[in-house]
Amino acid sequence: MARRRLLSDEQLAPFWAWASDERAIVRQYTLSRADLDLIAKKRTASNQLGFAVLMCGMRFPGRVLDVTETPPAAVLAFIADQVGVPPAQFVTYRQRPTNRREHVAELMAVLGCRAFDTDAYRELLALAVSLAQGTPRAERLVQSVIDEARSRHILLPTRRAIDLLCHRARARSESLLQRALTTGLTDETKNSLDALLKIASEMTTTRLTWLRNASQSPAPTNILGLIERVEFLRKLGIDLRATASHPSQRVRSHRARGPEDIRPAFSRGGSAAPARVADGGRSVAGDWADRCNAPDVRQADGQPVPQGRAAQSGEGGQIRP
């Protein structure tokens, strides 16, 4: 089964694109005196322009120009004007792949660039795993990884390579979060959580569906149903403080995908299924934490309603008794 990509080629294209507006072109592709002196050492006009274009591309967008690629006309004209060579000379340069390979190797040494090799992949993957824990949006994760690659002078690989790296980073981030959420659960609690996916004898749905489909309205007719669910969750003995060390955005995103993550793992069985099911149960409890401590529910349950900061923050991280 083909892996679903985080972003399409159309969504990834801007990250690999040359600067387009006039101000960005001037900012990114203005050559220094040292650059021009180095370029002037090339013997022919076509080599001078090709070398300059490669230099600018390796700085921004931070990649090596494809063999058949020509920069946008505005970019090529701006670079050619600084070098003092007609833009048409770039067509001649593209016909000499040997010169191009030599120039790329020279520029990597001059600019301090690194290829996207195994070491670079591991560096960026470790960073991406950390970023993924607080960055639920794929676009922001890809942008952060590319920005970091540029800051470390790592030349950008193909779009597919970055997409795969970010996909693996999100998977590892999910695994770390699931491990944290399920650590410390007793066998009894895990069995109780497993039972959430079974259709209860006294109803036509699973307990998990019953918990998630509670009315959001605080109307008096719904209070008894809310209290019943609160009592049920209290008996599970789930401590929500396990989520305290993880970004709240990531935890909320994980909860929102609860059923989506649980069903495939449960159908596969094996050691992964109990962990996913337990995680799903904890996620449901997390969704209910605020509801359980809402003033309307606590008052109907005969409990004191906390005031001030305690009421706003929900101190303790547990479903209160």
Image (cartoon, rainbow, N blue to C red):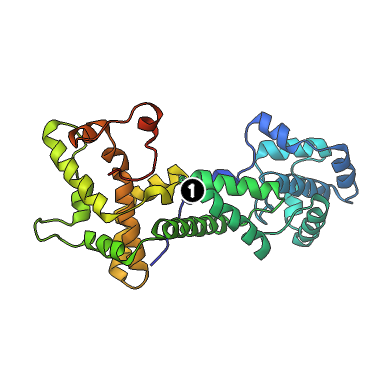
Q: Which residue is mark 1?
A: 245
- In the image, taking residue 34 as reference, residue 312 lies left or right, namely left
Tag 1: Cα neighbours inside 10 Å, few (<14), some, or many (≥20)?
Answer: few
Vertical order, 309 against 178 (above or below): above
Residue projecting furthest to the top: 308
In this view, the residue in front, 129 or 39, is: 129
Secondary structure of the residue carrying numbered label 1: loop
Residue drawn at x 20%, y 52% is 209
Q: How many marks?
A: 1
In this view, the residue in front, 11 or 215, is: 215
**The N terminus is located in which quarter?**
bottom left
Residue drawn at x 41%, y 58% is 178
Vertical order, 30 against 121 (above or below): above
**The C terminus is located in which quarter?**
top left
- The x and y percentages for residue 222 are 14, 37
Residue drawn at x 42%, y 62% is 3
Residue projecting furthest to the left: 202
- The x and y percentages for residue 242 are 42, 51
Residue drawn at x 41%, y 48% is 241
Vertical order, 257 against 186 (above or below): above
- In the image, taking residue 151 as reference, residue 135 lies left or right, namely left
- The x and y percentages for residue 65 are 68, 52
In this view, the residue in front, 281 or 18, is: 281
Q: Where, by quadrant of the figure, is residue 300 drawn?
A: top left
- The x and y percentages for residue 252 are 38, 45
Task: Name the amino acid type tagged 1.
Answer: Ser
